Image (tube, helix red, strand yellow):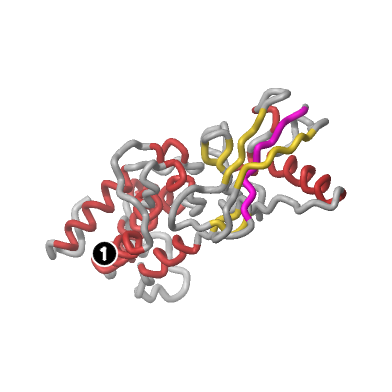
């Protein structure tokens, strides 16, 4: 398969970037998207040109590092997968593929397709930690938790912090990410002690870092590789408003 790649090139956050075109040929349809970029970089290095900088790590859809905006969609043309799980058979022979970094003010460009997502780390750090001393591994029935709540908490905890929700949102909102991190603790009894402080600090840090507001377009949910529901945003809002008005710590879900 042959492709024309239109790739965003940018030296650093302060430099002006631009799209550059590259032609690549004889790509197997079973080749992953990142393997295709590896092949391109090998060719660029062989020609004495600067390779394209892009993030990757596990290449198994777990780490969320491979954050690329491909043909107008975060992570590419498939649903509920990361960029590393996209294969070239999802494109047509001869296609022009546009590849960009995440576009959001809090995600400054480090180089080419790599952005700085430390803003997510700062939001998590603002939430603090759980002070409950659980000791060793407790018996499974030592802390009774309804299966429904446990399942919802695990769904929220599946967030890999890739930033697709921010990239998909027209306002660059981080509400789905923050809501997932709030929910995974708010649904469990161990997380209730700091619940009020946690949600207020995380939302405040999100606003401080320059993420936009949620306008309920559901683009975040549609592009999330882990299919995290916007229901978590509703839960976070209840937690936040309950904390603001000084309600009980165990806010009714």
Q: Residues within 10 Å of mark 1 (few under 14, many from 20)?
A: some
Residue at numbered disc 1? 200
* Number of numbered markers: 1
In the figure, 66 relative to 80: above or below?
below
Q: Residue at x 68, y 23 (%)?
A: 92
Magenta segment main secondary structure:
strand
Q: Residue at x 21, y 52 (%)?
A: 238
Identify the element where label 1 is drawn.
Answer: helix
Q: Residue at x 66, y 49 (%)?
A: 59
Nearest the viewer among 213 and 142 is 213
Picture quarter containing residue 132?
Answer: bottom left
Picture quarter containing residue 68?
Answer: top right
Picture quarter containing residue 93?
Answer: top right
> Does residue 150 appear in this view?
no
The x and y percentages for residue 222 are 43, 36
The magenta segment is 2-10
| Quadrant of the rendering where the N terminus is positioned | top right
The x and y percentages for residue 129 are 38, 71
Q: Residue at x 60, y 54 (%)?
A: 114
Is 8 contained in the magenta span?
yes
The x and y percentages for residue 54 are 65, 52
């Amino acid at each position: 398969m042959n492709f024309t790649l239109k790739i965003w090139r940018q030296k650093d956050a302060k430099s002006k970037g631009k799209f550059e075109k590259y032609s690549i040929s004889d790509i197997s349809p079973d080749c992953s998207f990142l393997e295709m970029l590896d092949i391109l970089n090998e060719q660029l290095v062989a020609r004495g040109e600067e390779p394209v900088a892009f993030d990757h790590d596990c290449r198994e859809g777990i780490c969320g590092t491979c954050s690329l905006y491909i043909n107008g969609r975060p992570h590419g043309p498939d649903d509920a997968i990361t960029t590393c799980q996209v294969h070239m058979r999802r494109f047509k022979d001869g296609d022009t593929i546009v590849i960009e970094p995440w576009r959001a003010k809090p995600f400054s460009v480090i180089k080419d397709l790599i952005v700085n997502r430390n803003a997510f780390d700062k939001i998590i750090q603002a939430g603090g930690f759980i002070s409950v001393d659980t000791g060793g591994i407790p018996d499974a029935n030592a802390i009774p938790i309804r299966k429904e709540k446990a399942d919802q908490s695990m769904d929220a905890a599946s967030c890999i912090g890739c930033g697709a929700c921010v990239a998909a949102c027209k306002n660059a909102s981080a509400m789905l990410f923050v809501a997932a991190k709030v929910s995974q603790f708010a649904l469990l009894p161990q997380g209730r002690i700091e619940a009020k402080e946690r949600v207020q600090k995380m939302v405040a840090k999100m606003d401080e870092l320059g993420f936009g507001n949620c306008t309920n377009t559901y683009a975040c949910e549609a592009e999330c590789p882990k299919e995290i529901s916007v229901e978590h945003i509703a839960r976070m809002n209840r937690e936040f408003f309950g904390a603001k008005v000084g309600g009980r710590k165990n806010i009714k879900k």
